[in-house]
Amino acid sequence: MAESTKFYDFCLPLLNGKDCCLQDFAGQVLLIVNTASLCGFTPQYQGLQALYERYRDHGFSVLAFPCNQFAHQEPGNADAIGDVCYGRFAVSFPVFAKLEVNGPNAHPLFEHLKSSKPGWLGPRISWNFTKFLIDRDGIPRRRYSPRTAPQKIAPAIEALLQRS
C-alpha cells in the first residue's frame, strides 16, 4: 500500500463525536499535532491558529489530537477540551477526540506517522505538541519537536503549498 493511500485511509472521531476521514483533507498540506490543555506548550494553540488563518485559503489545515499520555496534562472530557480549544484559544481548525500516541493503544495514525518520521531518539513521541507536516499527497515530510514554535514551521508550509 502506498504511503499516501495509508494516510488517507484513517477515519477518527472529532471532539464532537462525529467521524472525520483524512480523505476529506486530500490535496491539502497538513500539520498534525498531539495536544494537551494543561501543558506549558498549550499557548502554541495561538500560533497554530495563526498558521491556519494565514494559509487555510491556500490549502492548509491544522489537525489537533488531544492526548493524556504526558504527565496527565489532558485529563478532561470532550467538553473540557473544547472549553480550552474553542473558548480560551478560539481555534477554528479540527480538534479530534482524545487518543493515545504511544504504547499498545496508540492510534494507528500515530503509529504510521512515527514510523514515517522517527524523532531524534527514535519513533516514540516524547511530549505534547509534537508536530508532523504532511504534504498534499499525504506523505509525512517533517517532524517537529514540541519546542518548535508554530511560526517557525511557516517556511516549510509555504514550500509545500507552492508545489502543485
Image: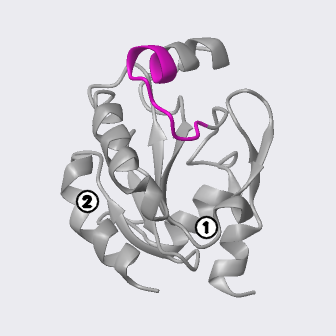
Residue 126 appears anywhere in the view: no
Residue shown at 53%/71% (left/top)? 115
Q: Is residue 71 magenta?
A: no
As drawn, is 129 to the left or to the right of 62?
left
Q: Nearer the viewer, residue 9 or 87?
A: 87
Q: Which mark is residue 36?
A: none
Question: Which region shows up in magenta?
Answer: 84-95
* Residue type at the position of mark 1: His
Q: Tell me if residue 7 comes above or below residue 131 in the rendering.
A: below
Q: Please state, as top left, top right, bottom left or bottom right, where the N terminus lies in the image.
A: bottom right
Q: Nearer the viewer, residue 151 or 77?
A: 151
Q: Nearer the viewer, residue 110 or 131?
A: 131
- Cβ–Cβ below 8 Å for labels 2 and 1? no
For the residue labelled by badge 1, is the local secondary structure a helix, a strand or a loop? helix
Q: Tell me if residue 85 comes above or below residue 9 in the rendering.
A: above
Count the marks: 2
Q: Tell me if residue 15 comes above or below residue 80 in the rendering.
A: below
Q: Which residue is mark 1?
A: 112
In the image, farthest residue toward the front: 57
Residue shown at 57%/12% (left/top)? 80
For the residue labelled by badge 2, is the local secondary structure a helix, a strand or a loop? helix
Q: Position of residue 131 (x, y in %)?
A: 39, 54
Q: Which mark is residue 153?
A: 2
Q: Position of residue 34 (x, y in %)?
A: 48, 43
Residue 65 appears anywhere in the view: yes
As drawn, is 162 to the left or to the right of 137?
left
